[in-house]
Image: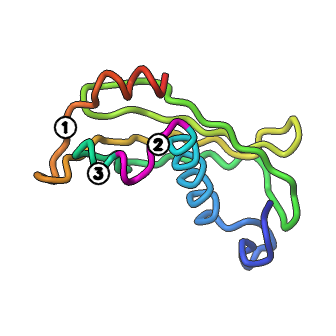
Amino acid sequence: MPTAADIDELGHVSNLVYLRWVLDIATAHSSSLGWSHPEYRALGSIFVVRRHEIDYVAQVREGDPLVGETWVDSWKLASCIRKTELRRGDQVVARAATTWAMLSFASGRPTKIPDHLRELFT
């Protein structure tokens, strides 16, 4: 639910807050499946954002009750596109598509997403 700190000078939720929500929802989803920072560290690689695209469908104001939903929409060898929707009741207020790349901790370069993670997130 948006707080006073989330509101910009136009009286609605700031674009940066939507971005934070998209990241928070993705992180919560990963954690709910048992994959937080320690698990990625043990794997030797982690998902990092390469691109965000957000469509702002309706204004959101302080106190509006929101629900977020996320899913992985498509996969490539070392990246995936995660979709996110934010809703106020039945109304979609924002849609996002985020490209995540699997990055090696050791090399800092993209690396293949393990099959077991593809299966888990699908």
Dot 3 or dot 1: first in sequence order is 3
| x and y percentages locating residue 102 in the rendered image | 28, 41
As for residue 37 lying within the magenta part, the answer is yes
Residue 113 higher or lower than 5, as above or below: above
Left or right: 15 in relation to 77: right
The circle drawn on residue 56 is none
Residue type indicated by callout 3: Arg
**Residue at image mark 1:** 111
Mark 3–mark 1 Cα distance, whole angstroms, equals 14 Å
Q: Amino acid at mark 1?
A: Thr
Residue sitting nearer the eye, 63 or 51: 63
Per the model, the C-alpha gap separating discs 2 and 1 is: 18 Å
- Expressed as whole percent of the image width and height from the top left, the position of residue 6 reads 72, 72
> Where residue 65 sits in the image (x, y, percent)?
86, 53
Give the SS element for disc 1: loop
Q: Name which quarter of the figure residue 19 lies in.
A: bottom right
Tell me the distance, in whole angstroms, between the alpha carbons under discs 2 and 3: 22 Å
Q: Image check: 107 left or right of 19? A: left
Q: Residue at x 62, y 45 (%)?
A: 55
Q: Position of residue 79 (x, y in %)?
A: 32, 34
Give the residue drawn at x 87%, y 58%.
64
Q: Secondary structure at mark 2?
A: strand
Look at label 2 and name its amino acid.
Thr
SS category of the residue bearing label 3: helix
Work out whether 32 lies above or below 74.
below
Residue in the picture at 47% in, 28% down: 121
Residue indicated by mark 3? 41
Magenta range: 33-39
Quarter of the figure with the N terminus = bottom right
Counting residues from the N terminus, which is met first, the one under dot 2 or under dot 3? 3
Q: Which residue is mark 2?
A: 98
Q: Residue 14 appears in which quarter of the rendering?
A: bottom right
